[in-house]
Amino acid sequence: MTAPTLNTTRSQELFSAAQALMPGGVSSPVRAFRSVGGQPIVFDRVKGPYAWDVDGNKYIDYIGSWGPAICGHAHPEVISALQEAIEKGTSFGAPCALENTLAEMVIDAVPSVEMVRFVNSGTEACMAVLRLMRAFTGRDKVIKFEGCYHGHADMFLVKAGSGVATLGLPDSPGVPRSTTANTLTAPYNDLEAVKQLFAENPDAISGVILEPIVGNAGFIQPEPGFLEGLRELTKEHGALLVFDEVMTGFRISYGGAQAHFGVTPDLTTMGKVIGGGLPVGAYGGRRDIMEMVAPAGPMYQAGTLSGNPLAMTAGIKTLELLRQPGSYEKLTATTEKLIAGIKEAASTAGIPITGASVSAMFGFFLCEGPVRNFEEAKATDAERFGKLHRAMLQRGVYLAPSAFEAGFTSLAHSDGDVEATLQAFRESFAEIA
Ligand code: KE4
């Protein structure tokens, strides 16, 4: 059953103009649909689980602005709180009580966080946390994992995931080798490789940073014992364990992936959900480490718009909505139904698939699996995924435009939305089989 061809004339006009104004016509590479083909659609507005493009087409959205829209886009209580806050100004550049409120909420929720600093993006949070790891330990090297993405700061653009993997970039030009010389990499889920790196670099590794559930190489879960093993190894070697929870924070559970798995890192980065759709990042952790951050300590980090009242307001209201009883049970039920249906639809069409979900995060690869690391993720049939993405878009379902991203559900996705999505998957898999 071939989907009707949507009228996307206005999107095409706007995107064509955008490409003359901005590199690739986008403000972030993955939005350009380069790896899935077809024309990006230009959004006009979003609400709940839906997005509408500038031609009036409606989509069920499983990106949710790449994570922030976990309560649904433009939640009325978030909008109302922002409308009230904006009357008092958009940015103070001075302390405000709202920072205390959001800080208390994050500290109360996230097991590792005794003190927190707000910034404006996940990239900033990861840049700062690496500087803090090095400042606290006096060591320069860091271990990251192939396929994990920690923002676009130079030192992390080594075998990175997300858009770097999506575009098949050999990391990035413009990054001096001297900058990445201290970035060591290992395959995800490979404790032996990490042990080897510590043995080869005695007393030189400041710590290990990872996505506790990978969302930037597709969706890859830690194998039993992996996180616990890293906790032990870092302790044994006087190094720090850092969970990059920019994507998993407040999505996997109200305490993040660290609460879900029961493994407590020394430091945590956050973003996305804690800004409720406005620019917020954060890093936090043990008080003895965080008190090194200026002006309490010597490690410098700063930001004009950090902690601004609008972003704090959106974050506070979003976390208030999420901490309502039953939120994560609902998110889990929605997402488990979705991924089960996707796998069934692919199998019915005879298409190899492996996939899973944890709470409001899911992903699948179009290959037999299992997928335990980035190398195995590359076995996914990216070309077939591109055909699937286009077929789903024509049927009004908006999936991440990359085989190396995760999918996100929200409290706003209804059973009806999931059923409509699964029907689109059944038709699309049949079309591309
Ligand atoms: P931002 O600088 O994009 O706010 O955060 C960087 C970042 C850090 N750590 C993790 C685990 C992340 O997932 C991200 C950003 N995620 C991507 C999606 N894969 C953002 C989407 C984009 O780059 O446009």
Image: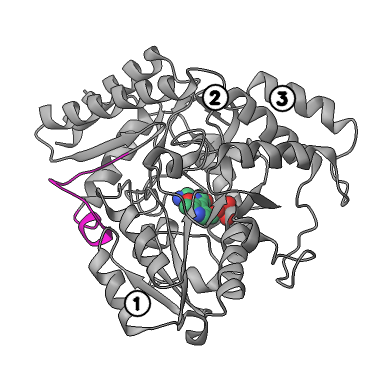
Q: Residues within 10 Å of mark 2 (few under 14, many from 20)?
A: some
* Residue bearing mark 2: 56
Determine the residue positioned at 75% across, 36% down.
101
Query: Which of the two labelled residues, at mark 3 and mark 1, occupies the earlier sequence position?
Result: 3
Q: Which dot, 2 or 3, sits closer to the camera? A: 3
Q: Is residue 98 above or below residue 322?
A: below
Seen from the viewer's position, the closer of residues 140 and 91 is 140
Q: How many marks?
A: 3
Asked if disc 2 and disc 3 are in contact, CB closer than 8 Å, the reply is: no
Q: Which dot, 3 or 1, sits closer to the camera? A: 1
> How far is the residue under mark 3 from the one under mark 1?
48 Å
Residue 31 at x, y percent in the picture: 49, 48
Q: Residue furthest bottom?
A: 178
Quadrant showing the C terminus: top left
Seen from the viewer's position, the closer of residues 401 and 182 is 182
Q: Is residue 162 above or below residue 152?
A: above
Residue 147 visible here: no
Determine the residue positioned at 34% across, 24% down.
4
* Residue bearing mark 3: 79
Q: Quadrant of residue 393?
A: top left
Residue 303 at x, y percent in the picture: 76, 59
Q: In this image, 97 relative to 20: left or right?
A: right
Amino acid type of the residue that numbered disc 1 sits on in the rendered structure = Phe
Amino acid type of the residue that numbered disc 3 sits on in the rendered structure = Ile
Query: Which of the two labelled residues, at mark 2 and mark 3, occupies the earlier sequence position?
Result: 2
Amino acid type of the residue that numbered disc 2 sits on in the rendered structure = Gly
Disc assigned to residue 198 = 1
Q: Which dot, 1 or 2, sits closer to the camera? A: 1
> How far is the residue under mark 1 from the one under mark 2?
55 Å
Seen from the viewer's position, the closer of residues 145 and 202 is 202
Q: Which residues are magenta?
A: 363-379
